[in-house]
Image (cartoon, rainbow, N blue to C red):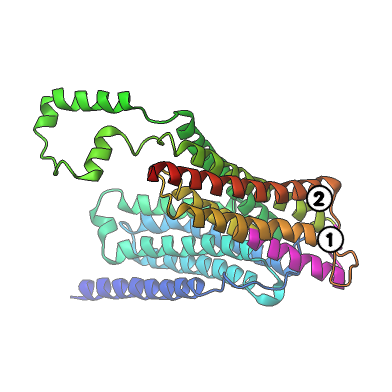
Amino acid sequence: MSTNSSDDDLKRTHEIFVESLRRLAASLRDLDATSSFVLSHYRQLPDTISHAREMLETGATLVKGTSTKYTLLGGLDPKEQVKAAEDLIKGCQFVATGCVLIHEPSLGCCLAFRRHVKQASRAIVEAVVNLVSSFVDQTALVEENLGAQKTGVVWEVCDQIIEKKVPMGNRNSIRRDLFTYLKDCQETFDEFQQLVDLGPMTTNGKQELQTIEENSVKAEQIEKPNEDDTGWQQFLSGENEQYSSHEIPVATASLTLVKCSRGSINLTLQACEAVGAQIQEGTKLSSSDKIRLEWLEKLYQLACKVGDGMTDFGTNLYPPLDLEHLPAQIEQQSMDCLSPLVDSVVDGCLLEDGTAALEFTEEVMTLAFKLKTAIATRRKEALDSVAAAVAVVAS
C-alpha cells in the first residue's frame, strides 16, 4: 500500500513539473517577436545582452547535462530522478530568463535577434516537456529507446545555443536572415531555370507517352477517370512538368525578377554594413546614430518582404502558368516589394532638410541605381510577355 502511495506521489511530482514547464513554454510563446523596437546597438553587445546570452548558454548546458542522467534514473531510482528533474526545470528557467531579457524593449534588440532566440528557447523547453511527459505516462519505460530518443532531441536543441549556432546580436541575426533569403532566391532561380532549359514540351513527347500508356497491361488495369478529366490527361502527357512554347518567354522574363530580388537582398547586406560601420557604439548614441539604427531596422523589414514575396512569387511559376493571376504577382513583387527597398537606399542618403544622414560607398549606390532601372525594365518585360502569351492562347 505504501509503495503504491509512493509511486503516486512521484507521478504527481512529475505532473507538477510538466505543468510548470508548460507555463514556462506559454510565457515564451507569448513574447513579442513581431513589433519593432528602437535599436540600441548593431555590432557590439551591451553588457545586459551579454549577460542574457550567458544565461541562455548556462541554461542550455545544464539542461543538456542533466537530460541523460534524468532518463537513466527513470528505470533505476525514481526518487533521484525527481532531483534531476528539478535541475532540468532550473536550466529551462535560465533559458527563459535570458530570452525574456532579450525581448525587453529598452534593450533595443531587433526583430531578427528576438525571433532567433525565441525559437531556440522554445525548442529547449518543449523538448524537456516531451521528455518529462514520457515518464509521466510511462511510455519511456514501456517503449524501447523512447527515452533515449527524446533525450537526443534535447541534446540537439541545446547544442544550437551551446555551439553558438543561434546568432547573437542585431548585426549577426540580420545577416543570418539575409543570407538565408539569398540562398532561397538562388535555389528558386536554379529550379525554374532548369525547367526553362528543358525547352517547350513537344507533340512527339505527348505521343510517346500515349503509346507507352496504351501498350502497358498494367496501365490498362488502372481505373481511370473520364476521358475528359483534365488533371488525368495532363498527368499522362507530362504537361505539368514542362512549359508550353508560349509559356517559355513568360517564365524567362519572370526569372529576371528573381534575379532582381536576389540583387536587392545583396544590396541590403552591403548597405547595412556601410551604415553599421558609421555607428559609434559603446557610448551614448547620437541623434545621427539613432537615425541610422532606425533605418537599418526598416531596411531589414523591407528585405524580409522581398524574401517572403519571392517565395510566393515562385509558387506561381510552376507549369502550367496561371496567366490570369500572374500579372498581379509580378506587380506585387516588383512594385510592392523590390521598389520600396531600393528606393530606401537611394533616398536614404538625405534627410528631409537635404543634409546627409547616411553615407554609402560608390559600389552600394551604383548597385542601387542599377537595380532601380532593372526592376522597372524587367517588370515591363514580364508583363509584356504575359500579354503576348494570353494573345497566343486566345488565337
**Percent of width and height locating residue 290:** 81, 70
Write the start and end of the magenta stretch as one range. 278-302
In reply to whether residue 307 is colored magenta, the answer given is: no
Q: What residue would you read off at disc 1?
A: 349
Task: Kindly state the secondary structure of the residue where label 2 is placed.
Answer: helix
Residue farthest along the left direction in this orientation: 221
> Residue 272: which quarter of the image?
bottom right
Task: Kindly state the secondary structure of the residue where label 1 is placed.
Answer: loop
The CA span between labels 2 and 1 is 10 Å
The answer to whether residue 102 is above or below residue 224 is below
Residue drawn at (26%, 38%) of the image? 235
Residue drawn at (70%, 61%) of the image? 299
**Percent of width and height locating residue 249:** 51, 38
The quarter of the image holding the N terminus is bottom left
Q: Earlier in the sequence, mark 2 or mark 1?
A: 1
**Percent of width and height locating residue 206:** 28, 28
How busy is the neighbourhood of tag 1: few (under 14 within 10 Å), some, or many (20 plus)? some
The quarter of the image holding the C terminus is top left
The three-letter amino acid code for the residue at tag 1 is Cys
> Residue 61: which quarter of the image?
bottom right
> Is 75 situated left or right of 323 in this image?
left
The answer to whether residue 276 is above or below residue 100 is above
The answer to whether residue 155 is above or below residue 281 is above
The three-letter amino acid code for the residue at tag 2 is Met
Mark 2 in CB contact with mark 1 (< 8 angstroms): yes
Q: What residue would you read off at disc 2?
A: 365
